């Protein structure tokens, strides 16, 4: 995520905003714009929509800033608010993802190189049910640990572990055998 120094800058900017200096919110936006757009993109796979979602998240963060208690890192709270906004907005709209079967057929004749493999994995993750997809995106693509993922999604750590386990099992069934780590071990 971010360095400890950034948390201090976030805390200071939040304090200033709450004291009436709304211009201080620009520092928060500057530090967190790219990570929030990236998170949204990984959930919806549409760059323009991701930018819109990030903007909605910042509006919500600004409006709810007084609710941040400062007990946890600002980043954890920010991601939890953003994730909540994204999930709410994505539930309202259907996003079409390429099917993993189509990707497999398109690429079966060609040898899978590293980029193709990554694309297949991303497509397979994108097609998971939202409960499993979201935990995979936060844990693997945003490199959050189990505790950070749990805080962001507002669920128990055990639930994160269970969802990761189930998501991996679903991916093993959906991915071609060339990408199944278990198939290589046998």
Image (cartoon, rainbow, N blue to C red):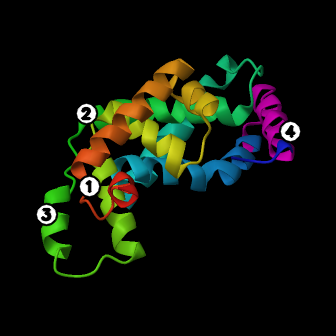
Residue named by callout 3: 102
Secondary structure of the residue carrying numbered label 3: helix
- What type of secondary structure mainly makes up the magenta span? helix
User: Do the residues under discs 3 and 2 have CB atoms within 8 angstroms?
Assistant: no
Decide whether residue 166 is among the magenta residues: no
Residue 118 in percent (x, y) is at 39, 65
Decide whether residue 12 is among the magenta residues: yes
Q: Give the magenta range.
A: 5-23
Depth order, front residue of 3/47: 3
Q: How far apart are marks 3 and 2 (CA)?
A: 26 Å
Residue named by callout 4: 8
Q: Which of marks 2 and 1 is nearer the N terminus?
A: 2
Q: Distance between the residues labelled 2 and 1?
A: 28 Å
Secondary structure of the residue carrying numbered label 1: loop
Residue named by callout 1: 175
Please give left or right for residue 176 compared with residue 68 in the image. left
Q: Residue 92 bears which disc, if any?
A: 2
Q: Which of marks 3 and 2 is nearer the N terminus?
A: 2
Q: How far apart are marks 4 and 2 (CA)?
A: 36 Å
Q: In which quarter of the image is residue 78?
A: top right
Q: Residue at x 53, y 41 (%)?
A: 139
Depth order, front residue of 118/179: 179
Please give left or right for residue 5 compared with residue 158 in the image. right
Closer mark to the observer between disc 3 and disc 1: 1
């Amino acid at each position: 995520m971010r360095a400890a120094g950034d948390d201090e800058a976030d805390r200071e900017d939040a304090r200033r905003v709450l004291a009436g200096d709304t211009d201080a919110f620009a520092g928060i936006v500057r530090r967190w714009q790219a990570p929030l757009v990236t998170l949204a993109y990984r959930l919806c796979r549409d760059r323009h929509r991701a930018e819109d979602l990030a903007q909605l998240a910042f509006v919500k963060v600004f409006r709810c800033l007084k609710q941040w208690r400062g007990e946890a890192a600002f980043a954890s709270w920010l991601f939890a608010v953003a994730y909540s906004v994204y999930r709410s907005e994505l539930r309202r709209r259907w996003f079409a993802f390429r099917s993993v079967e189509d990707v497999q057929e398109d690429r079966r004749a060609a040898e899978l190189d590293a980029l193709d493999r990554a694309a297949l994995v991303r497509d397979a993750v994108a097609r998971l049910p939202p409960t499993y997809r979201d935990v995979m995106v936060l844990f693997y693509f945003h490199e959050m640990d189990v505790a950070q993922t749990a805080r962001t999604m507002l669920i128990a750590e055990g639930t994160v572990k269970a969802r990761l386990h189930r998501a991996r099992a679903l991916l093993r069934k959906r991915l071609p055998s060339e990408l199944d780590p278990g198939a290589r071990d046998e």
